[in-house]
């Protein structure tokens, strides 16, 4: 099975880490990610089962995504 997955670092910045320590449920965590998260939050991304981005391994691959054509 193949999936698109993004791994997030909930302690990517000192402010994000501090605020995450004071969340009580999933809704609060998602709100904090939406307001304080940025590009540093993403650790890794898999598309169709293939690693296309990894912050730690310094991997960044271009991925072709075919566009939908509506007739």
Image (cartoon, rainbow, N blue to C red):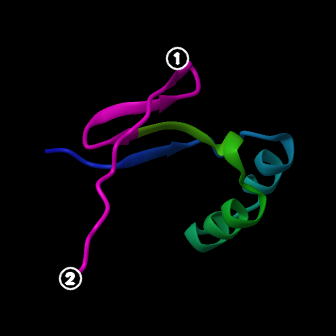
Q: Secondary structure at mark 2?
A: loop
Q: Is residue 43 left or right of residue 13?
A: left
| Residue 45 falls left or right of residue 28 | left
Q: Position of residue 57 (x, y in %)?
A: 52, 17
Going 72% across and 64% down the picture, which residue do you hit? 32
Counting from the top left corner in percent of width and height, residue 40 is at 70, 40
Q: Residue furthest front?
A: 71
* Range of residues picked out in magenta: 46-71
Q: Disc 2 marks which residue? A: 71
Name which quarter of the figure residue 49 lies in.
Answer: top left
Q: Residue furthest top?
A: 57
Q: Residue at x 13, y 45 (%)?
A: 1
Give the residue pinned by disc 1: 57
Predominant SS of the magenta segment = loop
- Residue 23, percent from left and from top: 71, 63
Q: Nearer the viewer, residue 51 or 11?
A: 51
2 vs 1, front mark: 2
Residue 11 included in the magenta stretch of the image? no
Q: Is residue 46 left or right of residue 58?
A: left
Q: Considering only vertical position in the picture, is 6 above or below 44?
A: below
Separation of disc 2 and disc 1 at Cα? 42 Å
């Amino acid at each position: 099975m193949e999936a698109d997955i993004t791994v997030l670092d909930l302690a990517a910045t000192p402010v994000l880490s501090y605020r995450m320590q004071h969340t009580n449920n999933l809704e609060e965590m998602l709100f904090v990610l939406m307001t304080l998260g940025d590009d540093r939050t993403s650790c890794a991304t898999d598309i169709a089962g293939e690693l296309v981005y990894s912050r730690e391994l310094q991997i960044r691959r271009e991925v072709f995504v075919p566009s939908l054509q509506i007739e």
